[in-house]
Amino acid sequence: MFDENGRLDTVKAPKVAERFCQFVQQNPNDSMAPLWLYHALELNVMMKNDEKSIELCNQLMKQYPDSKWAPKGLYVLGSFVYERDYKDLDKAREIFDRILTDYPDSEIIESVEASKKYLGWTPDQIMADIALKQFKEGPSFESDSIEEDEE
């Protein structure tokens, strides 16, 4: 699905996404269906096909709300469609809050919390905040490494 430069192949990717959707339509009870639907969502997000991405996320939430792919789909939707493409920070925040409320044990909770904290920030602003936090905390030394150096 990617060309020799690592860019998404805009001819192959839509066909692959459609095949993923066909699999889900033909095999809705298959244990892999939520994963393939999520991958179709990811591909549409990469292609910046926002309306289709929203449709696929809605389908994922309706058909497979208890799968581990449901909060991941919401996260992709909030981060890339609403924050990146639409610049709708209120909607992105609403989605992040929904994940935090509905999926508190999800493996992506830390990422969701960070995304919510840095919502609307530029990469430079985020890096500056992280660097400032590290500077304020100062260097951390483990007592074992200090003792070894002294010997």
Image (tube, rainbow, N blue to C red):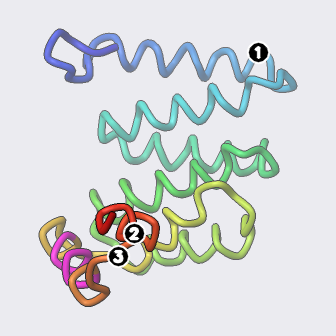
Write down the region rendered in magenta.
Answer: 127-133
**Counting residues from the N terminus, which is met first, the one under dot 1 or under dot 2?**
1
Q: Viewer-proximal residue, 7 or 16?
A: 7
Rate crowding at label 3 as few (under 14), some (14 to 19) or many (20 or more) other CA atoms within 10 Å. few
Q: Secondary structure at mark 2?
A: helix
Looking at the figure, which quarter contains the N terminus? top left
Task: Using the image, determine if residue 20 lies above or below residue 58.
Answer: above
Q: Is residue 89 left or right of residue 95?
A: left
Residue tagged by mark 2? 147
* Contact, mark 3 vs mark 2 (Cβ under 8 Å): no
Q: Residue at x 21, y 83 (%)?
A: 135
Quadrant of the rendered image containing residue 82: bottom left
Q: Position of residue 8 (x, y in %)?
A: 26, 22
Label 1 to label 2: alpha-carbon separation: 64 Å
Q: Residue at x 36, y 54 (%)?
A: 80
Residue tagged by mark 1? 26
Nearer mark to the viewer, of 3 and 2: 2
User: In the rendered structure, which amino acid carries the disc numbered 1?
Assistant: Gln
Q: Position of residue 37 (x, y in %)?
A: 62, 31
User: In the rendered structure, which amino acid carries the disc numbered 2?
Assistant: Glu
Residue that lies at the very extreme toward the right in this rendered image = 29
Nearer mark to the viewer, of 1 and 2: 2
Q: Residue at x 75, y 63 (%)?
A: 105
Rate crowding at label 2 as few (under 14), some (14 to 19) or many (20 or more) other CA atoms within 10 Å. few
Label 3 to label 1: alpha-carbon separation: 55 Å
